[in-house]
Image (tube, grey):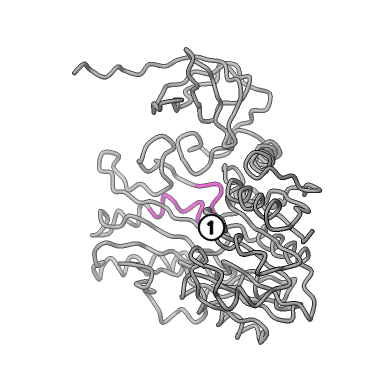
Amino acid sequence: MGRKKRREPETAVIESATHDGRGIAAVSGKKVFVAGALPGETVEFIRRKSRRNFDEAELLSVIEPSSDRIEAKCEAFGRCGGCSLQHVSEVYQRSIKEQTLKDNLERIGKVEPESWLDPMTGPVWSYRRRARLAVKDVPAKGRVLVGFREKHAPYITDMHRCEVLTNPVGGMIDALSDLIAKLSIRARLPQIEIAAAENALALVFRVLDEPSPADKELLIAFGAENDLRIYLQPGGLDSLQPLHPDIIEKSLCYTLPEFDIKIDFEPIDFVQVNSDINRRMVGFAVEQLRPGPDDRVLDLFCGIGNFSLPLARSAGTVLGIEGEKTLVSRASENARKNKLENVQFRVADLNKIDGSESWVKAGWDRVLLDPARSGAAEVIAHMRRLNPERIVYVSCHPGTLARDAGILVHEQGYKLETAGIIDMFPHTAHVESIAVFSRK
């Protein structure tokens, strides 16, 4: 076998861009996607991955910059895979995401809303209250790396702070590195999960070996010094354990003041990462569903009650359905604590329903959908039986939203009233969106 050809730097003009901020150049008849390059720029790059129809490349330098380019705030930008759009303004970022949503609805769903929503916006720095940081002891660098994965390699980014993580965690990267370096299990601690609530900040350390008593003392001291709740997770989700349970009197929580709702959660529960945007999103969803005292509302993929509980303030009856039993238990407890007697929760795998379920046949006036990236195809297939007058669909993937929107409009007898992006993850390529449907 011959030796693999060594990759060398190349220069090209960027002709267009993908929705996630990668510039596209045509070099010798093949497309090359250059992360961080903008249309119209002349750039130097090096190819990192070769595929049949295109190659992926790393940006080395910008020879002739675009007028849309700005300086990234984060020192690790370009290396860290956490953000991909810090090199352009927030307005430019949103325009990319809006175009992505429009293209998907048109191309996949063959639908267009009667009106477009303005982007739902909020803080763009220090906004992220949920995150998973990877951890790796790297003797060659003389330190423990803590951070997100690199953009072009499966390694952990050598970084010292994060501009999108909530305060004070964004500035704790070095402190966490120093802490873990002192532990006997420093090579057996692969991940830290962050959960920031309104009443406390929690760090969950994933541990593959039992920490020594000295390790636990160091972790407890770090928590006390930084006003953190420290948890260990030696196994699955049910293995979570507070390191100092005696000082944890109340659950983590966040509030939805517009609805006088307080929602308790555990550090590894799913909650929306951007609290300001979540409040706006919930308020808009309830406003668009327009539930009245006689209306029956179905909240699918309900989690811990983020939409169900606010909806119960004005609806006659609310049923929330979720696949994870622990989240359903948490949602039920949240309903009890908020003194809401008109909302119930049920466990069901919404990716495996067949339409024979009693709750499907019951009929509903309003339906809210907040599925994972795979969308809600199985539920959408039975929408005629559910028969709601109005539907609000919150999406974290424009492709599956477009697919489901096409079915609702072309097969299930609904019209797409309005749609728009939710800027839940500024500086990243994640496209969160919301769409409102009504019966034709």
- Residue 382 left/right relative to 28: right
Question: Is residue 175 on the magenta stretch?
Answer: yes
Residue 414 location, x and y as percent?
Answer: 74, 57
Nearest to the observer: residue 31 or residue 170: 31
- Residue 434 in percent (x, y) is at 68, 54
In the depicted structure, whether residue 277 falls above or below residue 293 = above
Helix, strand or loop for disc 1:
loop
* Count of all numbered marks drawn on residues in the image: 1
Task: Identify the residue at image location x=56%, y=49%.
Answer: 164
- Is residue 1 placed above or below 152 in the rendered structure? above
- In the image, 32 versus 167, the foreground residue is 32
Q: Residue at x 25, y 43 (%)?
A: 139
The image quarter containing residue 62 is: top right
Q: Residue furthest left?
A: 1
Read off the magenta span. 162-176
Amino acid on which disc 1 is placed: Ala
- What residue is disc 1 on? 372
Splitting the image into 4 quarters, where does residue 225 fall? bottom left
Decide: few, some or many residues near mark 1? Use Cα within 10 Å; few <14, some 14-19, many ≥20: few
Q: Nearer the viewer, residue 113 or 199?
A: 113
Up/down of 366 relative to 124, above or below: below
Looking at the image, which residue is at 42% across and 67% down? 223
Q: Position of residue 155 (x, y in %)?
A: 35, 41
Q: Quadrant of the N terminus?
A: top left
Using the image, determine if residue 73 lies above or below residue 167.
above
| 274 part of magenta stretch | no
The residue drawn where x is 60% and y is 16% is 64
Quadrant for the C terminus in the image = bottom right
In front here: 227 or 237? 237
x and y percent of residue 151 in the render?
44, 37
